[in-house]
Image: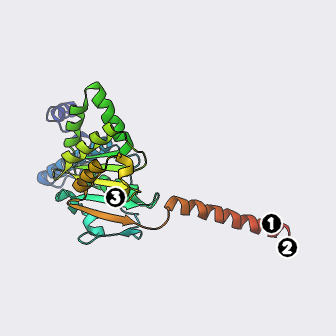
Amino acid sequence: MTQELANACKTLHLAYVMDAYESMPFDNRTDYLLSVLRAELKGRETTRIRRLMRRAKFPQVKTLEDYDFEPVVFPERCSQDMLKNLAFLKRKENVIMLGKVGTGKTHLGTALGAEACRRGHEVRFFRVHELVAILQEKYRFGGLARFRQELQRCELLILDEMGFVPFHQDGAELLFQVVSECYEQRSVIVTSNLEFGQWNTIFGDARLTAALVDRLVHHAHVLAFTGESYRLRHALSGVSSKSSVHREEVIACNPER
């Protein structure tokens, strides 16, 4: 009987019923069947989220739960709640995060992407220089059209670290094409340590830079990240703590001092 049930579940593509049916309380047939089907739906949803997270290719998984928004300066019509609720994604708007290195831009961008995956959205995460390298490779070996079609299936494209590495002309043009295809079709999150006026140093072409910024900023929320690097503060705090401990040890060993 158990084997027959397993075969039936396999035929019906019910992957999680066999793991749940024995542990469900049996008060009446309807409640029992509903509980088993709920377990199947929950299992499918969990698997789907894992698949979306894997396809997004986040370097690390971050959450919004422990994120400190204090360094973030919000523009009008944008707030913490709007970001957390992914209202910008529903409206196909962009989010541009500008600020010094280490102020939490990548953390927030990744956390928003992970939240989008948990809500069933297709997300792709790229360091910008890595995306440009992929685009150039695909272009050389004839796989560019297929790769761009894959990007077009996502609902949120995250471009991290815009400005760390300058591009050659062909790489800049390929990236511009990707951004243009996103315009009013899907949301883009961009993080950068450079102000818009400095983006010309990345692309090396004033007209191309102006056109790309124009497409990104239209229907966008520009967030400014203030303060010093979190990693630097953390490192300096550790050094300070060690120095304090060292001074206390010296005093303890030399009480006359």
Q: Name the residue under label 3.
A: 196
Expressed as whole percent of the image width and height from the top left, the position of residue 48 reads 24, 44
Q: What residue is rendered at 25% in x and 26% in y?
A: 142
Q: What residue type is labelled 2?
A: Arg
Q: What residue is rendered at 17% in x and 51% in y?
A: 32
Are the two marked residues, 1 and 2, in contact with CB atoms closer than 8 angstroms?
yes
Q: Can residue 63 be seen from the camera position used here?
A: no
Q: Quadrant of residue 225?
A: bottom left
Q: Mark 2 points at which residue?
A: 257
For the residues marked 2 and 3, what is the alpha-carbon distance in whole angstroms?
A: 55 Å
Q: Classify mark 2: residues with Cα within 10 Å, few (<14), some (14-19) or many (20+).
A: few
Residue closest to the far left: 30
Residue closest to the far right: 256
Expressed as whole percent of the image width and height from the top left, the position of residue 5 reads 18, 35
Q: Which amino acid does label 3 sit on?
A: Phe
Q: What element carries label 3?
A: helix
Nearest the viewer among 222 and 213 is 213
Q: What element carries label 1?
A: helix
For the residues marked 1 and 2, what is the alpha-carbon distance in whole angstroms?
A: 9 Å
Q: Which amino acid does label 1 sit on?
A: Val
The mark that comes first in sequence, 1 or 2, is 1
Q: Name the residue under label 1.
A: 250
